[in-house]
Amino acid sequence: MNFETIQPYLLPAGAAAFLLFRYFRFKAARKKLPGLAAAGAVFVDVRTPAEFAACNRPGSLNIPLDELPARAKKLDKDKPVILCCASGARSGVAVGMLKAMGFKNVTNAGPWQNTL
């Protein structure tokens, strides 16, 4: 078998592997959420205010991603922070931002529906 034979399958296989990885990563994060919530975790939704108003997890804070650097100062660095958005991409960026600011216990829950 040569490279030309398998080349058409590489992109679809890579995409499938990525989606499987993402599915299992968010599934593992979802299992941790009840314990984190019991420990006083703060749920932060980094979607836009319009997205948040349309549907959200009751009790969660809406801090849009572009406002996170300024508003993160109001969050307690000693409490777990659970981040969510529409797909998990923006909340993934938010995890990196908060960790860079000194937050230690930050979880990307992925889509906000995972936090229900």
Image (spheres, rainbow, N blue to C red):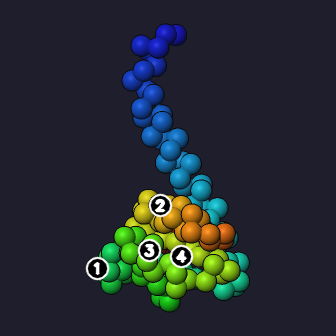
Would residue 107 be found to the left or right of residue 13 on screen?
Answer: right
Q: Say few, some or many: other residues with alpha carbon within 10 Å of mark 2 (under 14 / 14 to 19 / 20 or more).
A: some
Q: Is residue 2 above or below residue 81?
A: above
Foreground label between 3 and 2? 3
Residue beneath disc 3: 68
Q: Residues within 10 Å of mark 3 (few under 14, many from 20)?
A: some
The tag earlier along the polypeptide, 3 or 4, is: 3
**Which residue position holds label 1?**
50
Amino acid under disc 3? Leu
Q: Which residue is mark 2?
A: 93
Figure check: 23 above or below 37: above
Give the residue type at disc 2.
Val
Mark 1 to mark 3 CA distance (whole Å): 16 Å
Report which residue position mark 4 lands on: 115
Q: Residue at x 66, y 71 (%)?
A: 105
Tag 2 secondary structure: helix
Q: CA distance from mark 3 to mark 2?
A: 10 Å
Amino acid type at image mark 1:
Ala
* Circles 1, 3 touching at the beta carbon (< 8 Å): no
Of the numbered discs 3 and 2, the one sitting upstream in the chain is: 3
Residue most extreme to the left: 50
Q: Which quadrant would residue 99 be assigned to in this image?
A: bottom right
Disc nearer the start of the sequence (1/4) = 1
Measured Cα–Cα span from mark 3 to mark 4 = 19 Å
Disc 1 crowd, CA 10 A, few/some/many (<14, 14-19, 20+): few
How far apart are the alpha carbons under marks 2 and 4?
A: 18 Å
